[in-house]
Image (spheres, rainbow, N blue to C red):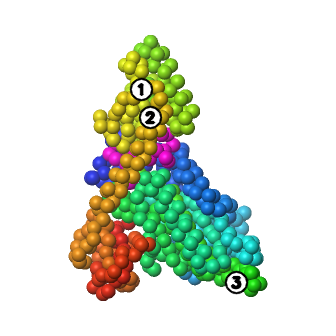
Amino acid sequence: MAEDKLPARSENFSEWYNQLVQKAELADYAPVRGCMVVRPYGWGIWENMTAALDRRFKETGHVNAAFPTLIPMSFFEKEKEHVEGFAPELAVVTHGGGEKLEEPLVVRPTSETIIGYMYSRWIKSWRDLPMLINQWGSVLRWELRTRLFLRTAEFYWQEGHTAHSSSEEALEEMYRILDIYADFAINEVGIPVIKGRKSETEKFAGAVMSTSIEGMMQDKRALQCATSHYFGQNFAKPFNIQYLDRTNTLQFCETTSWGLSSRMIGALVMVHGDDQGLVIPPRVAPTQVVLIPIFKNDAEKLAVMEIAVRLFKELKDAGIRIKLDDREEVTPGFKYNDWEMRGVPLRIEIGPRDLEKQSVALARRDMPGREGKTFVPQAGLPAAVSAMLTEIQASLLRKATAFRDANIHEPRDYDELKKIVEDGWAYAWWCGSKECEAKVKEDTRATTRNIPLEPPGGGGRCIVCGNPADKKVYFARAY
């Protein structure tokens, strides 16, 4: 299998990522420039992610709906900042049914405009508020430089859009969703993200305030994993989203939007993967356990398979996502490598010796080699496997958190900041000026990622200009 060996992450992280996504059958390139085909294994991860998120949304009162893919061009021209922000990325339909359309239609890059239009029709009274709607689907943004999952022209996501009667309620919603995203990333995907507010330069086009969760990849670059925005009345006014309040006075709504996309799969790959392939946290793994029977002849096969099938059923009945790999055309060694490449969290091996001892071997994907191998009794196996999956999930988060914390540094001066962001994140005082932010970007290609929600206390001097500063920000190179 030498030809299937991945490049080392330390030598070429980008190529390691590109090859792994394809070799592990997560996705492939589509015949349309910049688009991808998500393969069943990749979609299985996405399904588990969407289920975990959807449950959280519904627990907080949100409901799902579906809005059109095509949006009238005139809708985008109603909110100036929004159309300027998205104009370079728009794909426009000018013909349909063999004829030129009276008005061009935009393939949605995001749905604030069409949803704003519908909200103006649906919201009439304070009794209609808050309106809490989420949509699962895909959007199209004509990206110039693309990479599977991380930045493709078409990608899959959820986008929530809410309308409220007050700014306080809308801001509360924005932060609530940010907390949901952080909880999901940390506890389901094992990525220790940092919550914070975006700078004016980096905020969403048309937003009053944008917040994000940011994750550190193994090459120490940042990835914006999700965003939650407060729009104030920036969309309510151009789309006339109004309601009669309790005093029968006409008021404009306050709105929010928020989204998390399939780039989270790319984050999973880059945070947890190793030189052997994927390492998938158990909570989102399509297959949590693979059971591999080992035998050399028909007699051994008969005995081993009888127990293997029984254990498979016990584990499946316990709610564990398990596969029985009974392929006979390949060796056990090939199977080990195959499932390691796919990142299955736990491998169970059972052979003739294990039958004699009434045990099985467990091999953890997060701890390759002998260190991750243990032998446990067949009796009570579901409980032992469940406990080990829980430990693997926790271990992956601990490892990623330790890596992140070891690579965030607080520079003493601007020269040190420039060195830090070559191979890590800098956490530094910033005066808030666009000029200082632009200078860092020009000098280092690093951008402000976000400003932590909890202020550091006290004050300092801006790392760039030396002026008084009351906020700290993360600077990093990003995807």
Instruction: Work out how far the residue at label 3 is from the one at label 1, CA to CA, in angstroms.
Output: 67 Å
Of the image marks 2 and 1, the number of the one nearer the N terminus = 1
Q: Nearer the viewer, residue 381 or 344?
A: 381
Which image quadrant: the C terminus? Answer: bottom left
Q: Which residues are magenta?
A: 270-288
Q: Is residue 420 visible?
A: yes
Q: Is residue 149 magenta?
A: no
Crowdedness near tag 1: few (<14), some (14–19) or many (≥20) residues, C-alpha within 10 Å: few
Q: Residue tagged by mark 1? A: 377
Outermost residue on the top side: it is 299
Q: Residue tagged by mark 2? A: 384
Q: Residue tagged by mark 3? A: 251
Residue type beneath disc 2: Ala
Residue contact between numbered discs 2 and 1, judged by CB atoms under 8 Å: yes
x%, y% of residue 444?
30, 73
x%, y% of residue 368?
32, 39
Quarter of image, res 446: bottom left
Which image quadrant: the N terminus? Answer: top left
Of the image marks 3 and 2, the number of the one nearer the N terminus = 3
Q: Is residue 276 magenta?
A: yes
Residue type beneath disc 1: Pro
In this rendering, the answer to whether 56 lies above or below 202 is above
Element marked by disc 1? strand
Residue type beneath disc 3: Gln
- Mark 3 vs mark 1: give the one in front: 1
Q: Is residue 344 visible?
A: no
In this rendering, the answer to whether 53 lies above or below 416 is above
